[in-house]
Amino acid sequence: MPDRDYAAYQRAAPYFDLVRNALGVLVDGAHFFDVVTDETIYEVLYDVPGWPRVITGRADLMAAFRGYVSAVALRSADRLVVHRADDGAVLIMEYEVHGTILASGVQYDNRFCSIIRIENRKIVHWRDYMDSLAAWTALTAKRGA
């Protein structure tokens, strides 16, 4: 994570690094938060307690991720598959994240598919799908279970 302003998000660094690398030269900015705007729509098509279904703008997205990193520490993000569509204006990413639920110490492994629309070298819309059962199982598991 290149910028000290993002040190509070270090627990999600594997995710941010994977996403930024997948976006490559299609966007401007060194960090994930540098490639979103105050108008970016970040939409999740699943229900996770404490995570909103629609987040609008960089500040609200950063606030949501502050909550995420207070609950989960990622150790890796991998298995990236990238599909480009609409002459590079749309990127479809499949990937996995692996980490630990901090409250319980339970291991967390999940799969995602994200559909990203890019305009003027920034993300304007992000639609996210994930394995909701994997998240629910990790979030509700008891330590040592």
Image: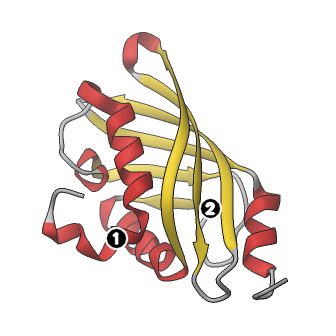
User: Which three-letter amino acid code belongs to the residue tagged 1?
Assistant: Tyr
Q: Nearer the viewer, residue 104 or 67?
A: 104
Toward the top, the furthest residue is: 87
For label 2, the SS is: loop
Residue drawn at (57%, 53%) of the image: 97
How far across and how far down the image is residue 77, in percent? Answer: 50, 49
> In the picture, residue 120 is in which quadrant?
top left
Rendered location of residue 131, percent (x, y): 75, 52
- Disc number at residue 70? none
Which secondary structure, mark 1? helix
The image shows residue 144, relative to residue 56, as above or below, that is below
Q: Which mark is residue 53?
A: 2
Q: Residue furthest front?
A: 144
Residue that numbered label 1 is attached to: 9
> x, y (%) of residue 141?
80, 80
Quadrant into which the N terminus falls: bottom left
10 Å crowding of disc 1: few (<14), some (14-19), many (20+): some
Q: Residues within 10 Å of mark 2 (few under 14, many from 20)?
A: some
- Residue drawn at x 29%, y 29% is 24
